[in-house]
């Protein structure tokens, strides 16, 4: 890839009125002499984040502001940003300064070397123990559900080519899962090592509930393996019940006085009942999401867009 290409930066913003300006300044410094644009997506932040974004757009026509009507989550905000980018390469990063914009050249270098996607890899994350635990579980889920290579580390700081972006934005259903969209679009992915910083202020917006919702998106949007697990568990339980029935008949025939205790019987009954309800819940989750998709529930709703870009504005 020739070096004179347009790079688009997509930054989902939430409660970042005091930090997003610093991230934008760092991008400007790092991309001096190169063509770029910045798309800031306000995920219906309750503070004055969009006012800050509006001011940044007024100061620089290479900055685009997108204001979502309600809070759709980080992944939906990224999808909204991808939809308005014009770049040959798109870089996604956080609004809190933890993802070092001054090391973006490492990601771009691997894109120039012919890779479709590049993910930042951190040797020492500055997240909380809860967030790191969630990232570990997410990694295990991706390996199982989306066939992510074991050695590949994924993060919110990544770069992809226009080809991959075009494939990603074809997904218009609710419950987007950005990592899953990348993994199903290409296997030509590589890691680069970058530093991970402390948050400038505040704390992560990911609560346990949001993490669970994100995992459910990955479970149900890009894999049918949970349904196959349910089928396998049902088959195992049915086979076990059949074998147990045969054993009971044989013991009766040979005259063995075999009496199963009440506690053991209740334990088995409760276990099987709970397992059935769990599998029905998984199936219900799939059916519910199909229903919502058929009703054309929006992936995101854009309330307002500030876009003053012109070709001359994104030149060097």
Image (spheres, rainbow, N blue to C red):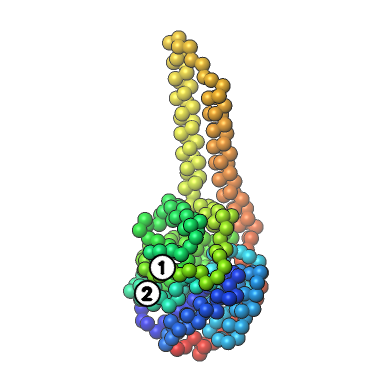
Q: Position of residue 190 (x, y in %)?
A: 36, 66
Cβ atoms at labels 2 and 1 below 8 Å apart:
yes
Dot 2, crowdedness within 10 Å: few (<14), some or many (≥20)?
A: some
Q: Earlier in the sequence, mark 2 or mark 1?
A: 2
Q: Residue furthest top?
A: 255
Nearer the observer, 170 or 240: 240
Q: On residue 106, which mark appears?
A: 2
**Vertically, is 260 above or below 54?**
above
What kind of element bears circle 2?
Answer: helix
Residue sitting at x 49%, y 40%: 231
- Classify residue 44 as left or right of residue 221: right
Nearer the observer, 307 or 46: 46
**Vertically, is 257 above or below 19?**
above
Q: Write down the quadrant of residue 194 in the picture.
A: bottom left
Q: On the rendered image, what quadrant is the C terminus found in? A: bottom left
What kind of element bears circle 1?
Answer: strand
> Is residue 241 among what the camera can see?
yes
Q: Which residue is mark 1?
A: 120
Q: Position of residue 299 (x, y in %)?
A: 60, 64
Residue sitting at x 61%, y 64%: 72
Q: Write down the quadrant of residue 297 in the picture.
A: bottom right
- Classify residue 184 as left or right of residue 280: left
Q: On the rendered image, what quadrant is the N terminus found in? A: bottom left
User: Marks 2 and 1, how far apart in space?
Assistant: 9 Å
Q: Position of residue 52 (x, y in %)?
A: 61, 79
């Amino acid at each position: 890839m020739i070096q004179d290409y347009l790079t688009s930066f997509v930054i989902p913003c939430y409660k970042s009125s005091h930090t997003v300006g610093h991230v934008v300044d760092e991008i400007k410094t790092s991309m001096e002499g190169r063509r770029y644009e910045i798309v800031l997506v306000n995920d219906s932040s309750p503070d004055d984040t969009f006012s800050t974004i509006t001011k940044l757009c007024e100061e620089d026509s290479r900055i685009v502001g997108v204001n979502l009507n309600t809070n759709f989550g980080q992944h939906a905000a990224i999808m909204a940003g991808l939809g308005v980018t014009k770049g040959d390469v798109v870089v996604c990063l956080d609004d809190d300064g933890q993802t070092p914009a001054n090391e973006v050249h490492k990601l771009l270098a691997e894109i120039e070397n012919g890779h479709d996607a590049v993910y930042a890899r951190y040797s020492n994350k500055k997240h909380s123990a809860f967030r790191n635990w969630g990232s570990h579980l997410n990694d295990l889920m991706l390996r199982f559900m989306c066939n992510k290579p074991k050695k590949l580390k994924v993060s919110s700081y990544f770069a992809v080519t226009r080809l991959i972006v075009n494939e990603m934005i074809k997904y218009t259903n609710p419950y987007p899962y950005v990592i899953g969209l990348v993994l199903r679009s290409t296997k030509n992915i590589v890691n680069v090592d970058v530093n991970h910083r402390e948050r400038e202020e505040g704390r992560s917006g990911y609560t346990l509930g949001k993490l669970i919702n994100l995992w459910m998106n990955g479970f149900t949007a890009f894999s049918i393996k949970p349904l196959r697990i349910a089928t396998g568990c049902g088959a195992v339980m049915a086979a076990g019940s059949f074998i147990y029935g045969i054993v009971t008949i044989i013991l009766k025939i040979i005259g063995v006085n075999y009496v199963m205790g009440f506690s053991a019987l209740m334990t088995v009954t409760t276990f099987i009942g709970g397992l059935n309800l769990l599998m029905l819940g998984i199936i219900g989750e799939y059916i519910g999401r199909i229903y919502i998709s058929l009703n054309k529930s929006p992936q995101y709703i854009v309330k307002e867009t500030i876009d003053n870009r012109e070709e001359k504005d994104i030149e060097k």
